[in-house]
């Protein structure tokens, strides 16, 4: 593994996941060939690090993550005058793309001999790590902030991990937990942005390229892990001669917590902590994204785009996506939400092929808020009458 910023090398036989300089580590680039048929782990096996290649596919503890539908959406394509595809990650085993990276990071953890699997998350990653950790038969611990609502814990708790409420700065906990596992191989933290998590996220890029030829790939961005994974996958495909040109990456954040966009627009190379996150898109509200600086570097290297959207635009986009038959969580709607501005300011040209990742399911954020005007009341005796009036 190599530090993405200073280049310092680290052994993958140790569980260190962050460089001493504070920037993320990355598994070296692995060119390969896509095999035909089978699961993502079989088809793309060539692209995985040695530890994974040595892992018996039957030992993967897979729940059939990945292999998600790529859907061409005609009505939305027409609205924005582009060829728009949605990569529907809501159908993963725990209903978000996080599962792809959880599998690979837990393989790394098992190879290192970890007995306890942990994560620092209150949302999709916690659910995913709890599900796979317990399936693997490991002791699993999820670190959450003290003031978390019970509602947020419901899915996580269903998988029966130890849930540890931790007092103190939740941002610091990310780093503290990684320090703990860097020093002790018995415990492994599978946090956002972990190098072996990125390896799993690569499969998203591979699937995208198998099923479409996008000019733009839009990526909802929080910690930066998903962005890094998709980019690493695309770069490896290019290095393997499978992809001629890397599509333009587009990183989108919610305006209420957009430290990466702020740095990008200010021409800065380093992100700064967002002081008070406030957005309905809670799944992408990391105030100090550990992969943020690397996202900035990759945007720079690949002439990417970086933009933010308001909660109003997010909610509108969530409805538009639902009108195509997919109920996604607010964080997942930011890609569609960004399209209007990106088209209007000419960043995305008319007729371009665009794919946006629908990262997680709307069932994750049920809040009892919907348009009650849609609900009408009638008596059973009035059913026929109602129908006649309707038609
Ligand atoms: C985790 C997550 C993201 C962002 O991924 P990062 O790797 O943190 O950038 C986007 N959408 C949803 C629904 C997520 O759970
Ligand atoms: Zn470094």
Image: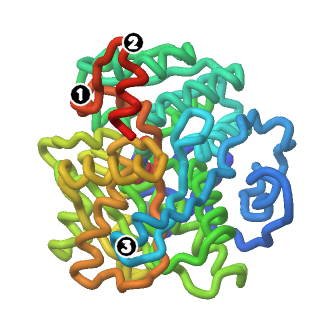
Residue that badge 2 annotates: 381
Q: Is residue 234 above or below residue 274?
A: below
How busy is the neighbourhood of tag 3: few (under 14 within 10 Å), some, or many (20 plus)?
Answer: some
Q: Colour scheme used in the picture?
A: rainbow
Residue that badge 3 annotates: 297
* Residue 16 in picture, x, y percent from top left: 53, 45
Q: Answer with mark 1 or mark 2, whichever residue precedes in sequence.
A: 1
- Mark 1 near mark 3, Cβ–Cβ under 8 Å? no
Q: Which mark is residue 372?
A: 1
* Residue 61 in picture, x, y percent from top left: 75, 33
Image quadrant holding the C terminus, namely top left
Q: Quadrant of residue 317?
A: bottom left
- Mark 1 near mark 2, Cβ–Cβ under 8 Å? no
Q: Mark 2 or mark 3, which is nearer to you?
A: 2
Q: Quadrant of residue 298?
A: bottom left
How busy is the neighbourhood of tag 2: few (under 14 within 10 Å), some, or many (20 plus)?
Answer: few
Mark 3: secondary structure? helix
Q: Quadrant of residue 264?
A: bottom left
Mark 2: secondary structure? helix
Residue in the image at 66% along x and 75% along y? 237
Residue in the image at 35% along x and 53% along y? 320
Q: Mark 1 or mark 3, which is nearer to you?
A: 1
Is the CB–ligand 1 distance for label 1 below 8 Å? no
Q: Answer with mark 1 or mark 3, whichever residue precedes in sequence.
A: 3
Of the pair 172 and 299, the residue shown nearer to us: 299
Of the pair 118 and 91, the residue shown nearer to us: 91
């Amino acid at each position: 593994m190599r530090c993405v910023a200073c280049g310092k090398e680290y052994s993958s036989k140790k569980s260190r996941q962050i460089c001493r300089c504070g920037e993320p580590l990355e598994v070296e680039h692995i060119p390969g060939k896509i095999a035909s048929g089978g699961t993502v782990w079989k088809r793309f096996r060539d692209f995985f690090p040695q530890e994974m290649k040595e892992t018996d596919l039957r030992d993967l503890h897979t729940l059939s993550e990945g292999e998600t539908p790529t859907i061409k959406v005609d009505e939305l394509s027409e609205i924005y005058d582009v060829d728009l595809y949605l990569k529907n990650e809501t159908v993963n085993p725990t209903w978000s793309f996080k599962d792809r990276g959880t599998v690979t990071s837990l393989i790394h953890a098992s190879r290192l001999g970890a007995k306890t699997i942990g994560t620092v998350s209150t949302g999709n990653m916690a659910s995913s790590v709890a599900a796979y950790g317990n399936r693997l038969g490991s002791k699993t611990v999820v670190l959450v902030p003290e003031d978390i609502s019970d509602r947020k814990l419901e899915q996580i708790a269903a998988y029966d991990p130890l849930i540890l409420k931790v007092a103190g700065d939740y941002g610091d906990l990310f780093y503290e937990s990684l320090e703990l596992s860097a020093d002790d191989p018995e415990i492994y933290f599978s946090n956002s942005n972990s190098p072996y998590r990125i390896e799993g996220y690569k499969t998203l890029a591979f699937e995208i390229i198998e099923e479409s030829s996008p000019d733009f790939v839009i990526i909802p961005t929080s910690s930066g892990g998903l962005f890094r994974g998709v980019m690493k996958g695309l770069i490896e495909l290019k290095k393997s001669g499978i992809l001629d040109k890397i599509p333009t990456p587009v990183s989108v954040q919610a305006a209420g917590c957009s430290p990466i966009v702020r740095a990008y627009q200010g021409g800065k190379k380093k992100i700064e902590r967002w002081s008070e996150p406030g957005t309905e898109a809670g799944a992408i509200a990391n105030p100090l994204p550990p992969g943020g600086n690397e996202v900035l570097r990759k945007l720079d290297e690949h002439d990417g785009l970086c933009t933010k959207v308001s909660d109003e635009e997010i909610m509108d986009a969530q409805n538009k996506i639902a009108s195509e038959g997919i109920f996604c969580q607010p964080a997942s709607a930011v890609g569609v939400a960004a399209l209007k501005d990106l088209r209007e300011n000419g960043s995305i040209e008319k007729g371009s092929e665009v794919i946006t990742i629908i990262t997680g399911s709307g069932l994750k954020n049920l809040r009892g808020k919907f348009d009650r005007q849609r609900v009408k009341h009638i008596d059973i005796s009035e059913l026929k009458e109602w129908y006649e009036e309707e038609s």
